[in-house]
Amino acid sequence: MTSYFIRMVTKERKRLTLKIWIDKRYQSLNYFLREKFGAKVFKISLDGGFSCPNRDGTISTGGCLFCSERGSGDFAGNRMFSITKQFENIKTMMNKKWKSGKYIAYFQAYTNTYAPIDVLREKYEEAVSQEGVVGLAIATRPDCLGKEVLDLIEEYSNRVYTWVELGLQTSSDETAKIINRGYKLSRFEEALKDLNERNIDVVVHTIFGLPGESKEDMLRTIDYVAHKNIKGIKMHLLYLIENTPMVEFYKQDKLRFLKKNEYIDIICESITRLPPDIVIHRLTGDAPRELLVGPMWSLKKWEILNGIDNKLKELDLYQGKAFNDISSGKSPIIISAS
């Protein structure tokens, strides 16, 4: 397995040290968790049975235009089952391929802080009590993090490794309005500040290919995130799923799918613009084959990931290569679409 050295920026992102990322030119979640826990760590995606204020009428009834009927938890457990039953079912499937490991209990579907505190505590407690669980991941919205919720998450962060995932998607309030995100960038910044003050790790979701956004808009979101105090990022491709409000955009010719080579180029350039201390949790997304409208190339996940690895090696790119240049106002790396 090929190894190479890259420059690693500390939390202050000034003093440089050397670090090895094994066979990747970016700090993957797999690498980070192996380093932290000394073993293979799996995420168990759970459906806590929650709803979302952007669906139940509190903010809106349509939800984000891209969000699936399962609240972006299409591969999570079955909400008709208990947390324990969901965990056992998914763990059993994983054990067919990997015989041993540790687990992150990942509340993925819908908004996982949108319930009374006693309900949240019951769900979280059941999840972290499962054998082998070493961490808790909670996907939610910035506008669903009141003081009681923050206190509860902080309590769990003092017991097990915990991170909160925030669905930013874009740093543009204009695009956010188009996709019916339901909150402004200022609300994201408030939530990030609250979580940072409690030393709770934050993972940010971004989406490439949103309606009306150019490559420059997408990279602007990456530059914004790169200069915030976050611990991780998920970079997703916008894929269109049946029965989502975004389908109407597609029918009205208001949505253009990114080509595979375009997406790979944007991802590679984004990686160079991120500081090396940010963990990259995801480089593309998954969609149920039977519900996918497009782009169909997104089904070939390993081709995409291999394409990213190959492009990084071909151009000698790696995470953080352009971060200091961009921070100092110098011209960033530009990758032309292949």
Image (cartoon, helix red, strand yellow):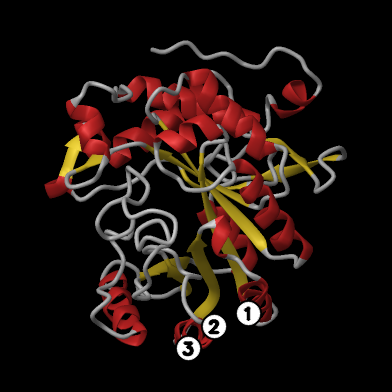
User: Which disc number belongs to residue 152?
Assistant: 1
Q: Amino acid at mark 1?
A: Leu
Residue 58, given in percent of the width and then of the height, sits at 43, 61
Q: Are marks 1 and 2 in contact (CB under 8 Å)?
A: yes
Ranked by sequence position, the earlier of labels 3 and 2 is 2
Q: Residue at x 72, y 61 (%)?
A: 194
Residue 98, given in percent of the width and then of the height, sits at 35, 69
Identify the element where label 1 is drawn. Answer: helix
Q: How would you rate the neighbour count of disc 3 (Cα within 10 Å): few for under 14, some for 14-19, many for 20 or more?
A: few
The C terminus, quarter of image: top left
From what the image shows, is residue 97 above or below residue 233? below
Residue 271, given in percent of the width and then of the height, sits at 57, 32
Rounded to the nearest angstrom, the CA distance separating label 1 from label 2 is 8 Å
Identify the element where label 3 is drawn. Answer: helix
Residue corresponding to mark 2: 117
Residue 107, given in percent of the width and then of the height, sits at 43, 69
Q: How would you rate the neighbour count of disc 1 (Cα within 10 Å): few for under 14, some for 14-19, many for 20 or more?
A: some
Rounded to the nearest angstrom, the CA distance separating label 3 from label 2 is 9 Å
Residue corresponding to mark 3: 122
Q: Amino acid at mark 3?
A: Glu
Residue, far left? 290
From what the image shows, is residue 266 above or below residue 104? above
